């Protein structure tokens, strides 16, 4: 390498140019870097000459069309001596070649951020750079950070390098760029800061491997301890250890080798170069190489005193088996070798979860694994508290669900729904009660809820043979299909216009009442001021309608108000909704959501927003029933908003698919094959004959 020390790779006063600087990643990283250390003097991108990358609070970065234009335009004092390449893989060779041709005697180091550059191209780049006396790091590097000089090239340190990197005496050399950040953060718990953090990259061919960088770290006066993060693939570590064995004196090394878990498994590791292709290239082989060099076994945190004695004797360093052991190992190593820590140790590294929801699992696991939630640090605590208070519904948590379910289980004897025995439900519950349990995870709180839900399902069975969803199973029967195909056809004929309106109504009700402090939807006395809510909604609706008419576009309709059949009178009703409303009135059941819909229908007509009182249709009634059942669960954050929104569509679909089965049975039994086909003489072609 041209560099004789780590400072020769990056130091204060260096000037950086970036290729493809207007690209998404390059521009974002450049802006953050300029805030940390304003060392980027210019960038270039084909076809973007004359543009700038604007840095809030700082000066703009000028953009040139090509590198030679950049070099010609900048005065000598501003010409770059470092270059960062963000170009796509197919453009890397051309851009680096241009840098070498026009930057010779000026450019000292090139960092290639791009990954998946072909081995052939990478080898050519190394040859070109070596001939020109330019150091080249990558490909697939995240860059370098010089913490003492407060400068970086690339994205090491992420969006907050000052939080991740404190000045100190560790040099981190890592195949993975993100692991430079992680290790730096971890080792603050050992009182150790960082001198340099370097991402070597891990494409198949590493241009500045460990063997080249170790001598620089050993000579660096700021570095007392070298930390390595190593991945499978390549013989770079063997080459470096062979070099170390020839030295009379080195600096202690702390190493973590990743990837052993994947050995013998059909697992693809993240970096293209992490491929085992011969002796000394597997994770296990590299572990053995380091252990042999150190002369001590892999670190065991439970035998810390023993290892301190071993390290004091051997002095070369140690390997850890798991990344979280790196803090304890660093503390043992510094104590054994008399290395002073850089600052008082930060808070010990430990798992401090902010949110915990183990559910029934929490009762069966050991106490030491059932960790209590930690205090959320500011400003995150206040932000989360504000969000939680202002929202309803549980936050969704994601995990692989291929062979798991919260909703059902079976031990080969007893099938269960959310822990409830299906056998007991068969004895004591109705189908609708069991369905609500299955959909919500909790049984209905009130007996009338089950009855109302059942009425909604019955109402959803049919609205006659002319509806789209009834036509579908009839078509299926006419074509000679099986019952299950006819039921699938029914479901396929249900959509956002036919059946899905309840989803939009549920979303609307959650948006409106989520800010109203509503707790019990069945308590009329504690209901929010519905007249004020309706007035506000109508005002907004009329405004949206006026804007849409002015623009000559359709305006969004109010979900679940009106019906194409029950729409002829000055005051319209859906007879199915009337049955549900009459049942509720007879049994003195109040539902704030249905009350809102009725007031809204009347208020729209009274304000002139509609020319008649539209029917509150059966979809609205079914949605209001389900929102009444789901609302307490939303308030207590036992279910998500997404689940509540899906309930009306599921309910309509459940009722209608049963009705579709009936249409199939009737048509299959009484109809003739192909009788749903439209005769040719009734079909019209609207285009022009072309031949």
Image (spheres, grey):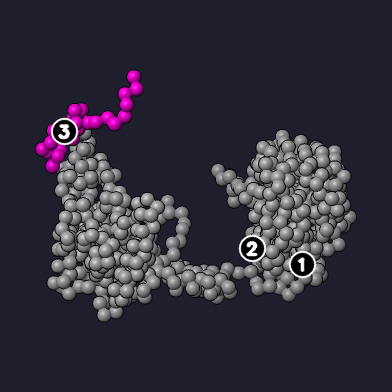
Query: Which of 34/548 is in front?
Result: 548
Give percent across and percent down for residue 38: 75, 59
Seen at 34% across and 22% down, the residue is: 690
Determine the residue positioned at 76% across, 36% down: 124
* Residue that numbered label 3 is attached to: 675
Where 152 sits versus 525, above or below?
above
Q: Is residue 369 visible?
A: yes
Image-based side of 230 in relation to 472, left or right = right
Between circles 3 and 1, the one closer to the viewer is 3
> Would residue 427 be visible to someone looking at this image?
no
Question: Residue at (26%, 80%) from the top-left corner?
Answer: 525
Residue 84: where, in percent of width, then height? 74, 49
Q: Nearer the viewer, mark 2 or mark 3?
A: 3
Residue at 32 percent of width and 26 percent of height: 688
Q: Which residue is mark 2?
A: 324
Residue bearing mark 1: 167
First in sequence, mark 3 or 1: give its number: 1
Dominant secondary structure of the residues highlighted in magenta in the image: loop
- Circle 2 or circle 1, nearest the eye: 1
Q: CA distance from mark 3 to mark 1?
A: 83 Å
């Amino acid at each position: 390498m041209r560099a004789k020390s780590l400072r020769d790779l990056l130091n204060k006063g260096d000037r950086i140019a970036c290729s493809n600087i207007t690209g998404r990643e390059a521009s974002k990283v450049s802006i953050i870097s300029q805030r940390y250390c304003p060392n980027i003097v210019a960038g270039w991108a084909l076809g973007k000459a004359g543009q700038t990358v604007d840095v809030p609070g700082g000066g703009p970065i000028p953009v040139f069309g090509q590198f030679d234009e950049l070099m010609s335009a900048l005065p000598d004092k501003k010409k770059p001596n470092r270059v960062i390449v963000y170009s796509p893989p197919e453009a890397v060779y051309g851009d680096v070649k241009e840098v070498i041709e026009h930057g010779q005697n000026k450019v000292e180091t090139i960092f290639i951020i791009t990954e998946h550059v072909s081995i052939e191209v990478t080898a050519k780049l190394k040859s070109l750079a070596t001939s020109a006396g330019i150091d080249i790091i990558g490909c697939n590097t995240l860059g370098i950070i010089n913490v003492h000089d407060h400068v970086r090239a690339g994205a090491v340190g992420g969006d907050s390098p000052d939080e991740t990197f404190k000045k100190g005496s560790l040099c981190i050399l890592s195949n993975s760029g993100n692991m430079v950040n992680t290790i730096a953060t971890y080792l603050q718990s050992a009182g150790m800061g960082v001198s340099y953090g370097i991402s070597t990259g891990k494409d198949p061919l590493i241009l500045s491997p460990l063997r080249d960088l170790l001598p620089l770290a050993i000579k660096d006066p700021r570095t007392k301890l070298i930390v390595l993060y190593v991945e499978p693939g390549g013989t770079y570590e063997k080459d470096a250890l062979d070099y170390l064995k020839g030295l009379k004196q080195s600096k202690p090394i702390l190493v973590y080798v990743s990837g052993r878990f994947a050995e013998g498994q059909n697992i693809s590791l993240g970096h293209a170069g992490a491929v085992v292709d011969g002796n000394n290239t597997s994770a296990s082989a590299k572990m053995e190489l380091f252990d042999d060099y150190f002369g001590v076994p892999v670190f065991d945190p439970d035998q810390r005193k023993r290892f301190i004695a071993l390290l004091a004797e051997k002095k070369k360093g140690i390997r850890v088996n798991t990344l979280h052991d790196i803090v304890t190992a660093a503390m043992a190593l510094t104590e054994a070798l008399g290395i002073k820590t850089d600052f008082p140790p930060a808070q010990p590294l430990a798992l401090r979860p902010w949110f915990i929801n183990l559910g029934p699992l929490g009762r069966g696991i050991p106490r030491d694994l059932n960790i209590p939630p930690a205090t959320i640090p500011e400003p995150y605590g206040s932000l989360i508290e504000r969000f939680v208070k202002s929202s309803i519904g549980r936050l969704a948590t994601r995990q692989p669900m291929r062979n798991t379910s919260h909703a059902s289980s079976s031990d080969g004897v007893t099938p269960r729904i959310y822990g409830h025995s299906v056998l007991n439900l068969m004895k004591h519950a109705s189908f609708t009660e069991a369905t609500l349990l299955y959909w919500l995870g909790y049984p209905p709180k009130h007996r009338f809820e089950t009855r109302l839900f059942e009425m909604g399902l019955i109402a959803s069975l049919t609205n006659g043979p002319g509806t789209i969803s009834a036509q579908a199973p009839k078509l299926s029967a006419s074509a000679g299909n099986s019952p299950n195909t006819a039921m699938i056809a029914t479901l396929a004929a249900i959509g956002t216009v036919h059946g899905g309106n309840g989803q939009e109504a549920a979303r609307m009700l959650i948006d409106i009442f989520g800010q109203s402090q509503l707790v019990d939807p069945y308590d009329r006395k504690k209901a929010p001021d519905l007249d004020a809510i309706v007035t506000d909604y109508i005002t907004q609706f009329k405004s949206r309608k006026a804007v849409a008419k002015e623009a000559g576009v359709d305006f969004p309709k109010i979900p679940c108000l009106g019906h194409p059949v029950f729409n002829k009178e000055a005051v319209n009703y859906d007879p199915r909704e009337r049955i549900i409303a009459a049942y509720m009135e007879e049994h003195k059941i109040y539902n704030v959501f249905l009350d809102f819909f009725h007031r809204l229908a009347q208020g729209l007509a009274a304000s002139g927003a509609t020319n008649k009182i539209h029917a509150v249709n059966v979809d609205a009634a079914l949605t209001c029933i389900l929102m009444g059942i789901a609302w307490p669960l939303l308030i207590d954050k036992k279910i998500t908003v997404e689940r509540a929104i899906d309930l009306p569509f599921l309910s309509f679909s459940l009722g209608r698919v049963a009705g579709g089965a009936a249409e199939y049975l009737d048509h299959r039994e009484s109809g003739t094959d192909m009788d749903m086909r439209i005769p040719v003489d009734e079909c019209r072609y609207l285009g022009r004959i072309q031949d």
